[in-house]
Structure formats: structure tokens, C-alpha cells
Image: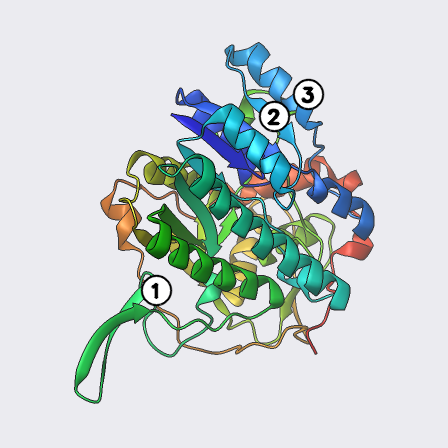
Amino acid sequence: MRIIVAGGDGFCGWPTALYLSEKGHEVTILDNMVRRKIDDELHSNSVTPIASLEDRVAKWKELTGKEIKVYEGDLNHYDFLSLVFKNERPEAFVHFAEQRSAPYSMIDREHAVYTQQNNVLGNLNVLYAIKEFEPDCHLIKLGTMGEYGQPNIDIEEGYIEIEHKGRKDTLPFPKQPGSFYHLTKVHDTHNIMFACKIWGIRATDLNQGIVYGLNTEETKKDPVLANRLDYDGVFGTALNRFLVQAAIGHDMTVYGSGGQTRAFLHIKDTVRCIEIAAENPADQGEFRVFNQFTESFSVQDLAEKTRDAAKDLGIEAKLSNIENPRVENEDHYYNAVNTNLIDLGLEPHLLTQDVLKEILQEALEHKDRIIVDNVLPKVTWK
């Protein structure tokens, strides 16, 4: 299958591109390299050293004989996107190419506007490119479980049947996004749903949980293929921050009470979910939603698991609660459905102590690269 992975230089996109290539697909990466530039803007870095994309794909070809094509450019430039579609004739378009950090979108007006323009308009360009050049191309779009927010009812997969004043209907599940970033994903969802309805596009919206883990079988083949490990207060997930804080002897800083609960999955499951979606495409005109996660944990749960993993490695990690920089419920009901991908064959990798220790050992190995000033939050919603 001819597959474009947009955002293929990123944390999820890079291992996905390798995995699909290893499975025999013709993979093309499209990326504007902005994530690397944001590291410079934030004076931050990946704990793991990251090779250039050019060196990455060259090493992959050297090791496997498989070629991954690369286009450097921006989805917001429609002439560029049109050229890629004309040249590659994609059968599936995997869309990771969006600014993915909630805190980044909340820094100030400029960052909120950038996030909205980059994500929403870029995705709209993809929809028009599919319509104009490859109407049978299957859009596999990374949404987020954060679109749903923290409702006091079970979270269904995209849709919910309701009864109101004696009548019933199946409607999109109500959205309560928690940042300007999460709002872009909601806008994307609405635009994709509308495009499927009016143009007959086929699309799968993957509402992904928070991704943890570092390596896949493909990224472990050579250090040049290594994946990112973000840890700062802007792009680092709570789990990554805890692991890195433990590695440098810093208190693990829990936001607020720590009762905030979210959905999670391993990076190995991310790449498998993309494969499942590609091999089982949506029907023409169908907009389907899969909740892409395997487990749910509270922030406090993650901190305690990290403390236990650190103890196994001879590290005494301590927890401390700090003021929550976000505006969110800290103690709430959370129960989400995730049956579609399981029914299609996903066999989950779970958050074990071995997984945590693997990431912690990587952080310890590259401890000299960790910028201590970056492990605390600097962006506030308030």
C-alpha cells in the first residue's frame, strides 16, 4: 500500500513510518521539521540524541534495503501538498502533522493562533487534496481522547445515542476540550465529518490517549533510528517528566491533587493501531471514530508507579504536590470505551515496571543531556 505519514519525523510518526515500511508498504514521510525548531525556541531537547531525518532514512535503507521517501514542506502550503499527492498517489494518508502540545498552545495569543492555523487549516488542506487528487485515499487522522474532556458519563467511541423529549438519535459525543490545542482536534473532527458527508471521503479518526514508551522493534535496530524522549513542562508528558525527575534526583511534581485521570497506550500499540486502520479502511463516505488507548491512570498512579520502578534501580524518588497550572477537574469520573481496535486485533502492551525501568535507564544513560530548569511547568492556563 502507498502510505504517506505526515509528521513522520516526530515521536509517533517516526516509529510508525519504520513499522509500516518493515511490513512492506511504500512509505513516504512528509514533515516541515518544525518540532526540531521548537526545541530551539524553548531551549529544550530530547533526552535521547536524535539524528537528522536524512541520516535516519539513510540508515534504515542501509539496514533493511527499504527506501522511505521524504518531502520537507508544510501542509499549509497547498501547492506543495498537491505536488506530493500527484507524485505519490497515496492510498492512505496518516496525519500526525499537527502541533501536539496543550501547554504550547496556551503560552500566549501568538502560540494559540499558530496552533489553530497550523492544525485546522493544514487538515483542511489535506481534505481538499484527497477530494481533488485521490478521492479513494483513506484519511487516518490522529485525534485525541482530550476532545472528550472529563464528562460524568461513560465516554463512547465518537457517537452516543440520546433520547430527548420522546425522540432518539445517534449524535457525535459531546466535546469538552481542555486547551486551544485540544480545540483544534475538535475542529478537525467536525471538518472531516463534514467532508465525508458531502464528498464521500473515507476517514478514521483515532482519538489517541497519551503515548508512553520509547522504543519499537524498528527503532532498536540502530542508535541512529532512536526515537524522541521529551521531558520538559511543555512537551513532556506527566509520565516522562516523572521518570526524568527521578533520574536527576528531583521531586516528582504532581499537579494538584493528582486525581486527574487519562487514557494511555504504548508506542508499540500506536504503530499497530495505524496498521489496523490502514488494513481495515473506512467505507466510502464513512467517518468512523476509534478510541485508541489500552489503559487509564491518574497522575498520582503514574507518580507512584515511577517511584516503585526507581526503587528497583536503587533510586529513592520522592513525590511532591504543586499548584496545578491547568484549569481542569482534579477528582472526577473517567470511564472510556475502547472496543473497536481490540475487536480488529489489537493486543495491548501494558504499562509494566519493565517498561518504566527501560525509559528510566535511558534517562540515566543520557543524564548529562537533561536541562534541569525545564522539568517544572512554566506555562499556566490562568
In the rendered picture of this protein, how many numbered marks are placed on residues? 3
Cα distance between the residues tagged 2 and 3: 11 Å
Give the amino acid type for the residue marked by disc 2 in the picture.
Val
Q: 10 Å neighbourhood of mark 2: few (<14), some, or many (≥20)? A: many
| 294 w.r.t. 327: above or below | above
Circle 3 SS class: helix
Which quadrant would the N terminus be assigned to in this image? top left
Q: Are marks 3 and 1 in contact (CB under 8 Å)?
A: no
Circle 2 SS class: strand
Cα distance between the residues tagged 2 and 1: 37 Å
Label disc, if present, on residue 301 of the rendered structure: none
User: Which label lies toward us, 2 or 3?
Assistant: 2
Label disc, if present, on residue 55 of the rendered structure: 3
Q: Position of residue 266 (x, y in %)?
A: 46, 44
User: Quick one: label 2 or label 1, which is nearer the N terminus?
Assistant: 2
Quarter-of-image position of residue 53: top right
| 38 on left or right of 237 | right
Label disc, if present, on residue 70 of the rendered structure: 2
| 48 w.r.t. 308: above or below | above
User: Which label lies toward us, 2 or 1?
Assistant: 2
Quarter-of-image position of residue 181: bottom right
Give the amino acid type for the residue marked by disc 1 in the picture.
Ala
Which quadrant would the C terminus be assigned to in this image? bottom right
Which residue occupies the extreme front position in the image? 132
Q: Which residue is mark 1?
A: 336
Q: Position of residue 102 (x, y in %)?
A: 62, 62
Cα distance between the residues tagged 3 and 1: 40 Å
